[in-house]
Amino acid sequence: LDFKHSSTLDADLQRRRERANACMARMSLYTSDIEALIDPADAADRVMAAKMGITILDLDKLKHLFLEVDRDRSGKVDEHEFKDMIRKAMGAKNGDLSEGRLHRLWKSIDANHDGEVDLEEFVIWWTRYAPSLVPVHVLAKFGWGA
């Protein structure tokens, strides 16, 4: 700051400015080192977990479950894959759950009605509805519930 209105910085202020610039340069080096250690996919996962209000560990569990369901590795789950997952999660055989109920569950997860569910739609649905739909012992398998 130029309190004397001389258009120059006094020596003390100049030293402070130089120290601040050096500190900022060191911080920049540390930040780039840390960023280099984080895989871009991990960074995206952290953003998604924060957006969903869950921990990164819970997101990892949900990604694992999603990949179990996404057998064709398309990055999307179709209605058939989803219904199989629900039957498996509930320990039901074909015919134990009505097609109508399974279809209603599908409609509740396919939020944008495109016939496919991506990971984000799956995470939103699971965190909202699965605790009331899926048996406790199945939730426990994935680290939720008792």
Image (cartoon, grey):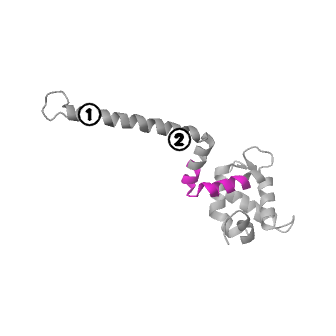
Give 117 or 8, whichever is nearer the viewer. 8
Q: Which residue is mark 1?
A: 15
* Residue positioned 34% across, 34% down in the render: 21
Q: Amino acid at mark 2?
A: Ile
Provide the major secondary structure of the magenta segment. helix
Which of the 4 quarters of the picture holds residue 44?
top right
- Give the percent coordinates (x, y) of residue 145: 66, 69
Which of the 4 quarters of the picture holds residue 85?
bottom right
Q: Is 79 part of what is drawn in magenta? A: no
Give 117 or 141, whichever is nearer the viewer. 141
Q: Quadrant of the N terminus?
A: top left
Give 85 or 37, whichever is nearer the viewer. 37
| Residues shaded magenta | 47-65
Q: Earlier in the sequence, mark 1 or mark 2?
A: 1
Examine the rendering and report whether any part of residue 6 can be seen: yes
Disc tally is 2
* Residue positioned 68% across, 56% down in the render: 62
* Residue positioned 81% across, 62% down in the render: 88
Q: Which residue is mark 2?
A: 34
